[in-house]
Every structure is written in C-alpha cells, then in structure tokens.
Image: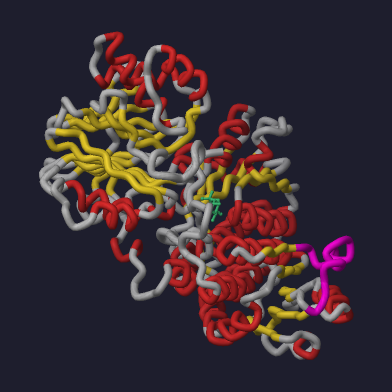
Amino acid sequence: MCGIVGYVGHREAYSIIIKGLKRLEYRGYDSAGIALLNGNLNVYKKKGKVSDLEEFLGEDKHFLNSTIGMGHTRWATHGEPNDVNAHPHYSSNKDLAIIHNGIIENYSSLKMDLTLRGHVFLSDTDSEVFIHLIDDIRINNNCSLEEAVRVALSQVVGAYAIVIIAKDTPNQLIAARKGSPLVIGLGKNEFFIASDASPIIEYTNEVVYLNDQEVAIIKDNLLTIKNIEDVQMTPYIQKLELELEAIEKGGYEHFMLKEIMEQPKSILDCMRGRVDSVRGHLVLGGLNEYLYKLINAERIMIVACGTSWHAGLVAEYIFEEFTRIPVEVDYASEFRYRNPVVREGDVLIAISQSGETADTLAAIELAKSKGAVIIGVCNVVGSSIARASHAGAYLHAGPEIGVASTKAFTAQVTVLTMIALQVAHKKGSISDHLFRILLAEIESIPDKVSTVLKLNEKIKYISSIYKDAKNVLYLGRGYNFPVALEGALKLKEISYIHAEGYPAAEMKHGPIALIDKEMPVVVIATKDSSYEKVVSNIQEVRARKGQVIAIVTEGDTQVAKMADYTLEVPATHEALMPIVAVVPLQLLSYHISVMRGCNVDQPRNLAKSVTVE
Ligand code: G6P
C-alpha cells in the first residue's frame, strides 16, 4: 500500500515522478504529494488522486527545472485522507522531507518523547514521527543524515519503505526498507526509486531490489547499500523483463477488462514450457529441489489473503483429491496469530499475486521459524514472498494492475493444479493415464476461456438487469464453492453491492431466509459430481421466487428450464472448472460496476498490494 517514487539525475524530475505515481496509483489513491529540491525543498500535496495534485499545481510549474525529487500516493492507515496527512512530511525546520509506505507501530511513544523535546507535529500520521526522529538524532548527535537514518531505523518498530531528501545535500536521496518493497533503477548518471518497477521500466531495465533492513544512499551519482549495522553490501543488479505495453491499457477502457480479456494468453504463459501432454511432461523448474519435500509431506498448509485465498481453497480440493495429502487453508492474517501447529517437514504454500502482502509474509516467517518448507506461488518476480520462499513457481501472468484480481486467480489455480499433478504423478497417487488426461485438459483451458469471453455481450445485458440489486447470493459446490466466493468478492469490491458466496448446500442453514423476488442468486451449476444436488438447490431458490443466473456446461437443458438466465461454458474436468467458470463472474461484476458509475480499477478504500497488516 502507498506508492513511492524517487528520482535523481539529469532529467526534469517532476514529470518522471508524476508519471511514476500514476503507475503506482493501484497501491493507494487517498492523497498524492511530491517534494522537489531546487535550492529550496518544496513540498506540494493534495487529498485525492495524482490528477487532483496536478490540477492543484496548475499550469505554473515553476519547479520544472528540478532534477531531484520524490512523490507518494497514499492508502491511509493513520490519519484520515486529507491534505495535511498526505506525504511528503517535513521535519520541523523544513530541512528534511520523508515519504513512507508501511506502519510505525511504536509511533505514539516516539511522538510523545519528541513532543517533549519540542517537536511540533502537523499531521496525525505515524510517518511524520519518522522524519522528526531522524532530525532529532541528526541534530543531537551532530551526525550525517545517513547515520541518523540508520539510528532511527533501529528505534522504530514496524514496516517501512522510505525515501528521504535533504535541503543541504542537493544530489542525495536516502532510501530504506523493512517489510515494504523498494526497487532502485540504475540509469546512466541517474537513479530511480519506486515501490515496484513500473515507474522505472521506460528508463532502464537494470534494477536492484533492496532487502529488508538495508539502506540505499544515492549521492553524487553513486549508489551505496549498507545494512543498518553500517556494513556495506554488494548490490545485486538484475535485468527487468517487464514490457512497457504490459503496464498500459492497450485500448481497453479499464485495466480490469484488459486483464479479464487477456486470460487465454496469461494462462497459456503460465504453462508455457512447463506442460507437454503428448510427452507426458510437467516441469516446474523452481520446485525441483524441494519437490521431494512436497511428495513426502504429511500435510500441506496453504496461506493467502483475498482472491489468492480463494485460489488456495481450490488448491485444497485439488491436492487432496490427487495427492491424498491432507491440506489446510488459512487466511494468513489468522494463521500468524493463532499459534498454529507447524512441524518440521510440513510444507506451507504461500499464494500471493503481489508477493508483498504483509500478513502472508508474516505467516511465512512464522512457519519457517518452526521448520516448515515454504513454497511461494507469486506473480511478481523478485517480490518479498518469492524471496522469502525456499522454492516456488511464478505465475508469469504479466502485471496485474486493476485492484480487483482476475487473471492472477486463473493463473494461480493453473499453477497450483500443475504443482498438485506433478506431486501426485511422482508420488504415484494418480495413474499415468489420468495424469496425461489432466495435462491435455490443462492445455485446452486457454481456448475454453476464449470461448467464455465470447459471452461478453450477453453478460453485459444480464448486468443491465441486475445492476441495481441490493444483495446478491453466489452459490457453488465442490470445486465451484471457491468460485462462488470469488464471484461475490468481485461484485462487492468494485460495485459496492453486498454479495455473499456460499456452499450451495449451506444455503438452507441461513441465507435461504434472505431469498425473495428481489434477490438475484448466481449459481455455478456445471456438470460435475455435485450437479444433481446443485439442481435441487436451484429448485429451492425458485420455490422462494429468487431469480437465478446460472453458469452451466454447454448443452445443459435441465437448468435452462429453471433459471432466469444461463451462461454456457465449455465442459472440462471438474478440477479445472474454476478457471473457466470464474470468467463470466468477473465480467458480470465488471459490467455492473461500470453501469453503476463506480471506479472499476480503483475501488474506494481498497489497494492492490496490502503491505500493512
Ligand atoms: C488485496 C487486493 C486483492 C488481493 C489481496 C491479496 O486485497 O485488492 O485483489 O487478492 O490483496 O493480495 P496478494 O497480492 O497477496 O495476492
């Protein structure tokens, strides 16, 4: 959460920073601010989006000749979204400014101390405390800014990615991280700092990912990285493989629609070079070394948040069915605080699109400390979770920018299915014949998703009928139960309609009381082992005059007679149906959101990457 951009070099900093902030807006959009150094250290900030900041700054960009600066787009934690709480924050004498992503947990005791020492605070944020602390240390110890930052870092508890700029050092930016991501782009006589690589990619493809508890000092065209004990570290320079088009809308009105539509390709990309049904081959290079741990595991734990947790639920069904290894799926935020039983030899699979979710990262650290092997399933290459894992498999789905996750979900389920099948095959818990059938079925999924996407116009029409619903119930059973949860999440997060996902059979234990003629019920009723039972559940809804929108398998005639609307999807093995069946639900939520005039890509109060707990 919160996006950070910094620049120092020979170009005009303002435009680079503003453009970078727009790319990072998915991380938060409560306020935006910028600090530019040009003799004076000037801070400009405004509640709202980066475009509000631009509007506030108007035509008169007298600061356009500044070649060093930093900017921030905020997702509010401490202090309401307003101009004062927006970043950057100044120190008392306005000699220093900071931008911060994360939470300083001991900020109130630090603030009390600093207030007694004469510091005056303007905002309600924890971040402002950080810069006063650094300033206080610098003045009292008469030390360099770099040293003061290091000392301050040893006093704060919590998570941070920070950038600091000082009036008296016009060629210097200092950055540090713990728990929140930071990447440094290395250009020719110029440096970029950002929360992810998207603001950097068009200038350079050489980057250094800062590690936890490291401080980067960019001064006079030199990058030095030290840990907080002042030991110099050797920067590990990596080449970015990101393409600029991948982070642009490519003609679509919204990133979410683009990401829904590109799923045939993103699913293909995540199986490229990994699956070959003809030769009976399935290879996941990043797992090789630890595959035996999975094969011999007595149980598998899965942790994740949000949509990734739903992918984890699908994986539970798949792993248990094919590998016969017991699986438990937890919300990472629950796992980390419930004193879970973790034994040496247990395997924990952490699923995360961003690879930065704070709770998932903390769950990993906990399980690791108890001897578990960590398998990361992430989309963002080089992310914190990917690096904290012993082994893993990337999604290779390309950047996902719309806050509501779509293509990451289908890629996660694809990758998790591949992992489960590889383990099952090596373990001998499925026959070679079934293994090959399932591999061929995986290979056919991109085409089947393409077929589903052709339903777009019909889904748009159905959306126009239900766009004003107050509540929507989503029902599914077996492999399709997590799909019902995911469909409901998509609708509520971008259209603000209350929606609940339920296992179809559980409906009669509560939600059935809500059903009347006003209540649309979306039922995933594809032909699988629970089909007949789901058909009975649809009858129960109809008997109470609920309206039914059903996702059915092509050629289904039974449900068509009962449902108000049906959406036919191609048949596949039931374990793979979630990848196909979720797509119409993504489109349904997308169109309803657009028709209600909501901000599809940046829904209120949400952020794409939740780096605070
Ligand atoms: C946020 C996003 C969701 C995402 C969840 C987990 O809530 O808005 O789309 O599913 O975080 O994120 P992760 O990056 O760990 O998958």
- Percent x, y of residue 153: 40, 22
What percent of the width, then of the height, locates residue 318?
69, 59
Residue at left offset 65%, top offset 84%: 568
Its colouring scheme is secondary structure
Residue span colored magenta: 502-517
- The relative height of residue 201 versus residue 479 in the rendered view (above or below) is above
Is-magenta flag for residue 576? no
Res 444 seen here: no
Q: Please determine whether, in this image, residue 57 is positioned above or below residue 447.
A: above
Q: Residue at x 43, y 55 (%)?
A: 26
Residue at the (32%, 41%) spot, across then down: 183
Return the x and y of residue 326 as percentages of the image width and height. Answer: 75, 47
Q: Is residue 512 magenta?
A: yes
109 left or right of 312 in image: left
Q: Which residue is more in the foreground, 228 or 129?
A: 129
Residue closest to the eye, 204 or 30: 30
Q: How far across and down, in percent of the image, does residue 296 sit?
A: 67, 42
What residue lies at 50% left-to-right and 57% top-to-bottom?
283
Q: Is residue 155 left or right of residue 551?
A: left
**Is most of the magenta stretch helix, strand or loop?**
helix
